[in-house]
Amino acid sequence: MAKGNEVRLRGSRTLAHVGLRGREFLGLWAGLYVSALTLVWTVASVLVLSVGMVRPSLRPHARRRVGAWVLWLCDRDLNRLARWLGATITPEAGTRTRTAYLLARLAVSLGSVCLILVIVPVPFLLVYGAVAQAVTDTATQVSVDWPGVGVTTSSIPLGLTAALVMSVLTWWVVMFLGGMDRWLARTMLGPTDEDLMRRRIEELTQTRSGIVRAVDEERRRIERDLHDGVQQRVVALAMLLGRAQRGSDAERSEHLVRQAHTESRVLLEELHEVAWRIYPTALDTLGLQAALTEAAERGPLPVRVRFDLAEPLPRELATAVYFVAREAMTNAAKHSGAREVIVDLRVQDARVRLTVSDDGRGGADPGGSGLTGLARRVQALDGTLEVHSPPRGPTTVRAVLPLDR
Amino acid sequence: MRLVIADDSVLLREGLIRLLEEEGHEVVATAGDGEGLLDAVAEHEPDAAVVDVRMPPTHTDEGLRAALRIRAERPQVAVLVLSQYVEQRYAAELLTGAPERVGYLLKDRVAQVGEFLEALDRVAAGGAAFDPEVVRQLLARTTRTDPLARLTPRERDVLENMAQGLSNTAIAERLFVSLSAVEKHINAIFDKLDLARTPEYSRRVLAVLRFLGS
């Protein structure tokens, strides 16, 4: 079963390959259009620039015009690459480099076209020859007498074989030319390795400060949990006991002490609750699924948890997933007015995908402190967090995290 | 006395109301935020307000800001501020006026019911009440920079109690010494700290705390 799937997959991949080469082939021809425009541009530029030479007051204007044409032409070519050759390139280079690129491309494109013009008709001619011989019955006997090969055969299979060989060769040439087209654009226009590295460093710096902020935010929340929850209860409890001590009425004192006892039990529960909110031990001991299920059970809303993981997630991922899911559940319970929450967790294409959706009234603010904190946390792991919450609902929070970084 | 209580924790508010009513006070209004507190004070003109520092919406210093406004607009209303922990800035801010009818206690102090009620009485009677912990921390901070190093340990004890807002008699009782001994110590403290002598009770708290806050 699995094998059959694989085979089918491979087959369709080959088909896709053929399709891709076909597109590439057409794309190479489409390159001619840009090349022709490049020729026009060269002539126009020379004209415009020479006008600039004659009338110095027009020089900056002429340069600007030529520059604008370069940008436009480059965009056309990048569009072509994206459309036909499957290469999306975000240009980083300046006008000068782009001009160089256009000229280099002109040369490559003319070379490619010549090569194509030479090589493509050959298999057609060979097939045509073989067919023509078959139809007119003019096939001749050919004896192939190479070192180690001595065959006498008809010219028809020989022609067809040669056509096949030439087709494969054409295939390779198209592959090579397409690759060259992409390579040229990428090296000349795209970001250099240094650019990419710089960008990555910027990104890391940003996510790092993001995670620091998220942690601080979390600490602040814990502090508030402790002071506004637990401490208040302790003070209230102590106040009860203080009142009990002050009176001389034994019955009243006893009543107050009993009340204090009840209060102390509530306090203990609250303390457990806060500790659990800070970090659920189940996450370490029983794993993500148990922790999520527990979180789901503690909440006031019915939560369905769908779990599709072949093996346990790395710890930092599990923790991030857990907190995103829990915050989303808490938000749903607090603000959405939902009746049910669905938590869906799966691994697909080497990514962990968590989706928490509710059937509430929507309108969640992705810029709210809870959600931005989570977004920062997810970004620090190179993931993305999306919140989709139109005004009348429903709300979907989706986190995607790469499994291996 | 007639009281207004401002605290966003219902639990604590209810506890305070019970406690104060049992002591024979009358709680005329309660509030859950700064605005509500100002309205309640304007409406009821209470003798004193017990105010939590952190209240909605930002949970930072709403209560304190409301307290400062009460102090500025209605000086006849005594204000006892309750804080989660020692925030020296707030303590100093409360003291920038005259230290009359003002107090700053840690919330934990409310648990020591006797001390809390005593402090409230003191504030309502026109005095000052500062949490021993606040005073201790302020003292600890300033001893490093020092004219206080010249004080004897006993004088430091007296200064600490004085800074909490206690009268000479109360200090004498607390430290088990005679009233005249306390007076002697206080004069020595004023001398050592180069403070002008004034017989007035609140003036010396002002002097001490201004010195601490400097």
Image: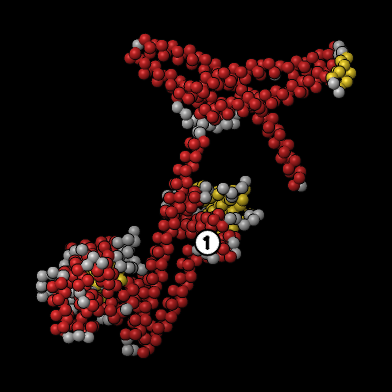
Q: Which of the chains bears the disc numbered 1?
A: A
Residue A365 appears in view: no
Residue B76 coordinates in the image, percent (x, y): 16, 69
The residue shown at (53%, 24%) is A77
Neighbourhood count class around disc 1 (C-alpha, 10 Å): few under 14, some 14–19, many 20 upward: some
Of the pair A214 and B114, the residue shown nearer to us: A214
Of the pair A14 and A184, the residue shown nearer to us: A184
Q: Would you identify the image quadrant in which residue B154 lies? A: bottom left
Left or right of A314, for residue B172: left
Of the pair A327 and B159, the residue shown nearer to us: B159
Q: Residue furthest front?
A: B150
Of the pair A280 and B16, the residue shown nearer to us: A280
The residue shown at (27%, 61%) is B35
Residue A49 coordinates in the image, percent (x, y): 41, 14
Looking at the image, what colour scheme do you see?
A: secondary structure
Question: Is residue A258 shown above or below A106?
Answer: below
Residue A310 coordinates in the image, percent (x, y): 65, 54
The residue shown at (71%, 16%) is A121
Question: Is residue A65 shown above or below B192?
Answer: above
Reading the image, the residue beneath label 1 is A301
Left or right of B14, for residue A147: right
The amino acid type found where label 1 is placed reads Leu
Q: How many marks?
A: 1
